[in-house]
């Protein structure tokens, strides 16, 4: 794991070893360990950054990295 890797629920989810700039819904759902329906709800309510490319929903890896950093909590916050 390098310094730009992020951990979600104890699993490295977004790592610079991933070459694709944009992730599909299913790929990001697997990384975040949530259902694709949950991601679609987050999209609908504006809770996660995404782009549409020719009508297809995609997630910019760099924007997801930044978004995940805003979601980090220390143990004392629970």
Image (cartoon, rainbow, N blue to C red):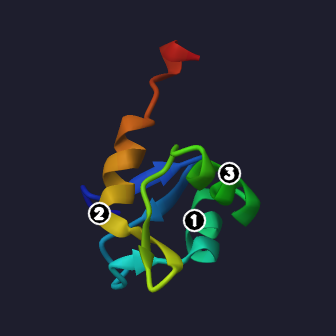
Comes first in the chain, label 2 or label 3:
3
Q: Nearer the viewer, residue 52 or 16?
A: 52
Q: Residue at x 61, y 51 (%)?
A: 44
Q: Under tag 2, what secondary structure?
A: helix
Helix, strand or loop at mark 1: helix
Compute the Cα span from label 2 to label 3: 21 Å
Q: Nearer the viewer, mark 1 or mark 3?
A: 3
Please name whichever residue, 4 or 68, is drawn nearer the observer in this view of the structure.
Answer: 68
Q: Quadrant of the N terminus?
A: bottom left
Query: Which image quadrant is residue 72 in?
Result: top left
Q: Badge 1: few (under 14), some or many (20 or more) residues near its Cα, within 10 Å?
A: some
Out of 27 and 55, give the one closest to the viewer. 55
Mark nearest the camera among 2 and 3 is 3
Q: CA distance from mark 1 to mark 3?
A: 17 Å
Residue at the farthest top position: 76
Q: Which residue is mark 2?
A: 62
The residue where tag 1 is placed is 31
């Amino acid at each position: 794991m390098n310094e730009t890797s992020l951990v979600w629920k104890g699993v490295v989810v977004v790592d610079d070893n991933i070459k694709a700039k944009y992730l599909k819904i299913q790929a990001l759902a697997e990384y975040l360990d949530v259902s694709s329906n949950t991601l679609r709800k987050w999209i609908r309510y504006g809770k996660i950054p995404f782009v549409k490319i020719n009508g297809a929903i995609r997630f910019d890896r760099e924007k997801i990295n930044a978004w995940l950093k805003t979601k980090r909590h220390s143990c004392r916050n629970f």
